[in-house]
């Protein structure tokens, strides 16, 4: 099959279209003929060798296409072997594209529990872009973060796949959503998705400004941090608030003042991806509320995966970057 094959770790330029062995559907597995795949920051880390993936290898966690055995249009849940305990993934958990060949290809093989029918209202690009950010944000906001209608949430960032999906889901749930960004234009675009306000996060005291935008000016019920700015995130919380951490794109270490943390009665919650149960919850929410579909920034052809990765790393886009396989 045609696939974007990673033969060595390195910059985006190592991604080249080539050939890779066709996957074989064994019992309990499904082969999907992909129509589109979507990029995630996780793919960049795999490309750089952070997950010690085998080479040659095919990247990609997100995808949508047709089941080869039935022709049914489906989306792929990238959480492989989550396990029976919904509170945390089991020891066999991995993300599609870590070690199992991923979605930057004509075909992909996944466990049968990881394919779900494609919603009629989504095109192929949107369907490919939904699973990873959708299930990740649903778990972060609701399963772990316990967000309810009428509460306030601060989303660090305004333009990436996680941020745009988090704004859409939280707003649909009836929460007041505030975003941060270095771009006034991106804040305005986040407003169109349901954000009530936005704060520039480049100033020396942006946290105080953000707190003032929360109801009562006393801080947020929940802060969603996918970048690793824990000290600032905690300061943005109201007393008794919850910090949900789901990424470390800007920092992998954090220093917290322990005394003020426990006197503040804060919750620090870690999360990653989501289970099949979380994915079912996401799809049910999309059926019953007005959740905006994933925002698509740019669609590249499959043979331009290197240029797609370059755009992702530049951080200048708004929404998801997608590869078309047609």
Image: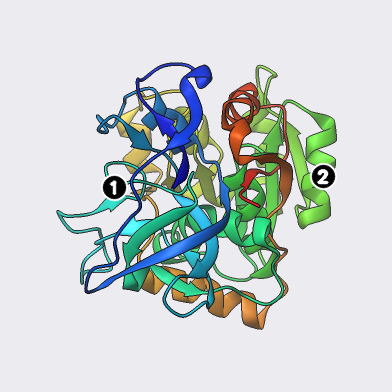
Q: How is the image coloured?
A: rainbow
Quadrant position of residue 207: top right
In the rendered image, residue 285, in percent from the top left (x then y), is placed at 58, 76
In the rendered image, residue 69, in percent from the top left (x then y), is placed at 41, 76
In the rendered image, residue 191, in percent from the top left (x then y), is placed at 81, 50
Q: How crowded is mark 1: few (under 14 residues within 10 Å), some or many (20 or more)?
A: many
All told, the count of numbered labels is 2
Image point 65% across, 27% down: which residue?
A: 311
Which of pointers 2 and 1 lies earlier in the amino acid sequence?
A: 1
The residue lying toward the viewer, choosing from 211 and 184, is: 184
Q: Mark 1 and mark 2 in contact (Cβ < 8 Å)?
A: no
The residue lying toward the viewer, choosing from 212 and 192, is: 192
Front tag of 2 and 1: 1
Q: Is residue 199 left or right of residue 250?
A: right
Q: Is residue 158 left or right of residue 249?
A: right
Give me the disc on residue 309.
Answer: none
Image point 71% across, 27% down: which residue?
A: 316
Which residue is disc 2 drawn over?
Answer: 189
Up/down of 135 relative to 158, above or below:
below
Q: Give the structural element (helix, strand or loop) at label 2.
A: helix
The residue lying toward the viewer, choosing from 102 and 48, is: 102
Image point 50% across, 27% down: which residue?
A: 16
Q: Distance between the residues labelled 2 and 1?
A: 36 Å
Which residue is disc 1 drawn over?
Answer: 100
Residue 241 showing in the rendered view: no
In the rendered image, residue 237, in percent from the top left (x then y), is placed at 53, 44
Image point 40% across, 27% down: which residue?
A: 47
Q: Is residue 46 left or right of residue 212?
A: left
Q: Give the structural element (helix, strand or loop) at label 1.
A: loop
Up/down of 253 relative to 263, above or below:
above
Quadrant position of residue 99: top left
């Amino acid at each position: 099959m045609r696939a974007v094959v990673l033969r060595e770790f390195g910059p985006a330029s190592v991604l080249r279209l080539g050939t890779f062995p066709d996957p074989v559907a064994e019992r309990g597995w499904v082969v999907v003929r992909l129509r589109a795949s979507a990029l995630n920051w996780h793919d960049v880390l795999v490309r750089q060798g952070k997950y010690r993936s085998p080479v040659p290898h095919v990247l990609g966690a997100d995808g949508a296409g047709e089941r080869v055995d039935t022709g049914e249009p489906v989306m792929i849940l990238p959480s492989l072997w989550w396990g029976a305990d919904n509170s945390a993934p089991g020891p066999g958990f991995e993300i599609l594209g870590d070690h199992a060949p991923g979605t930057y290809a004509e075909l992909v093989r996944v466990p049968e529990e990881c394919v779900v029918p494609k919603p009629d209202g989504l095109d192929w690009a949107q369907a490919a872009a939904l699973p990873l950010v959708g299930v990740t944000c649903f778990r972060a906001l609701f399963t772990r973060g316990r967000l309810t209608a009428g509460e306030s949430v601060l989303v660090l960032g305004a333009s990436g796949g996680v941020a745009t999906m988090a704004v859409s889901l939280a707003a649909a749930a009836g929460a007041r959503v505030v975003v941060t960004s270095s771009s006034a234009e991106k804040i305005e675009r986040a407003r169109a998705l349901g954000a009530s306000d936005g704060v520039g996060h480049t100033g020396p005291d942006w946290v105080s400004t953000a707190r003032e935008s929360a109801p009562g000016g006393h801080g947020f019920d929940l802060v969603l941090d996918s970048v690793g700015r824990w000290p600032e995130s905690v300061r943005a919380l109201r007393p008794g608030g919850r910090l949900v951490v789901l990424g470390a794109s800007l920092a992998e270490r954090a220093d917290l003042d322990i005394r003020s943390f426990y006197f503040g009665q804060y919750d620090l919650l870690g999360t990653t991806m989501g289970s099949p149960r979380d994915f079912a919850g996401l799809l049910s929410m999309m059926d019953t509320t007005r959740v905006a579909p994933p925002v698509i920034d740019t669609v590249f052809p499959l043979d331009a995966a290197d240029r797609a990765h370059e755009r992702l790393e530049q951080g200048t886009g708004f929404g998801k970057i997608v590869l078309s396989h047609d």
